[in-house]
Image (cartoon, rainbow, N blue to C red):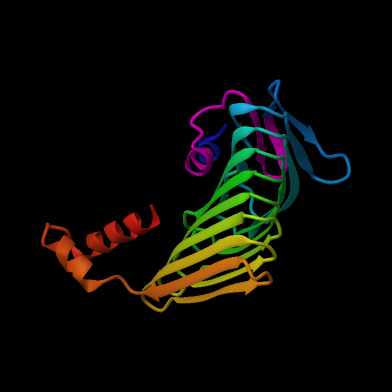
Amino acid sequence: MDAITKELLVQTSDLHAIPQGAYNIRKDGKLLSRNCSKEIQIVSKQDRDGIDIIIAPNTKNQSVHIPVVITQGGLNDLVYNDFYIGENCDVLIVAGCGIHNDSEQSSTHNGIHTFHIGKNAKVRYVEKHLGLGQTNSGKILNPTTEVHMDEQSYFEMETVQLGGVTYSDRKTNAVLQANATLIINEKILTTDAQKAMTNFNVELVGENSKVEVTSRSVAQNDSFQEFNSNIIGKAKCFGHVECDGIISDRAIINSTPKISAQDVNAMLVHEAAIGKISEDQIIKLMTLGLTQEEAEKQIISGFLS
């Protein structure tokens, strides 16, 4: 692998070498490398571009990496990945995506991921996005995540936009059955004239289902962010949405957390806060020897950690 590919794999998927166990590495719209394990099978789709990841019931303490790397200008990549997680599993799935583009043409990756999570299964899903290369080169990432959760299943999703992505439109839709739990943690950084759109839509249809959505974002320079969430409680359930943003320069953040209770026993809560960095925090760090710029970077780093 060349140096750029290696750098993107490290920053988006924490891969310093080819991982052990199951993995599928995609580069510039084509398969670069793949490996399956006894419990985790990865199969190419026959009808369209993408893969099926099939995890056998009772699989424990295993991981699968499916990073995507784009180093070609003008590429428009579209892939459909379906995950079938068997009952009683406990697995980690890492799906980082990085684009390096120095050309005058935009490079785009559209990933449609659908999760079928079996009864009592536990999944941690990490999705990191990064853009590198010239500032004015288009680096576009549009992930769509569909989640279908069976009874007593648990799904934790960490989605991070590390920077350099000129435009992103993230859509997450989930349906939870009885006693299922969905935890979503989103972190976004935009600078220059970048735009980031987020849409969460979660239906709590089973008794005692639960969702917690936490979004932390920083918008700088002339960037724009929009956060939308819609939590629908159709049974005795609990839903909580928290959206916090830091804004500076001429940036704009729009936040619209929506909740809809359709059952008398649904308990739904939303919170949203947007503001600039506290001057007291900056002054406190400057008394410790930091410059104002260093203090602001330190505060933002802690906020997004």
Q: Position of residue 23 (x, y in %)?
A: 64, 31
Which of 111 and 104 lies nearest the eye of the viewer? Answer: 111
In the displayed structure, does residue 258 sit left or right of residue 83? left
The magenta region covers 7-33
Residue 148 included in the magenta stretch of the image = no
In the displayed structure, does residue 280 sit left or right of residue 1? left
For image coordinates 41% across by 73% down, the residue present is 273
For image coordinates 80% across by 45% down, the residue present is 49
Q: Is residue 41 visible?
A: yes
Q: Position of residue 294 (x, y in %)?
A: 24, 59
In the displayed structure, does residue 197 sit left or right of residue 250? right
For image coordinates 80% across by 36% down, the residue present is 44
For image coordinates 64% across by 49% down, the residue present is 180
Which of 83 and 211 lies nearest the eye of the viewer? Answer: 211
Tell me: residue 249, above or below residue 294.
below
Tell me: residue 53, above or below residue 256.
above
Q: Is residue 104 visible?
A: no
State the residue lying farthest toward the front.
Answer: 264
Residue 16 included in the magenta stretch of the image = yes
Q: Position of residue 28 (x, y in %)?
A: 68, 44
Q: Position of residue 166 (x, y in %)?
A: 55, 63
Which of 120 and 183 lies nearest the eye of the viewer? Answer: 120
In the displayed structure, does residue 100 sit left or right of residue 248? right
Tell me: residue 68, above or below residue 243.
above
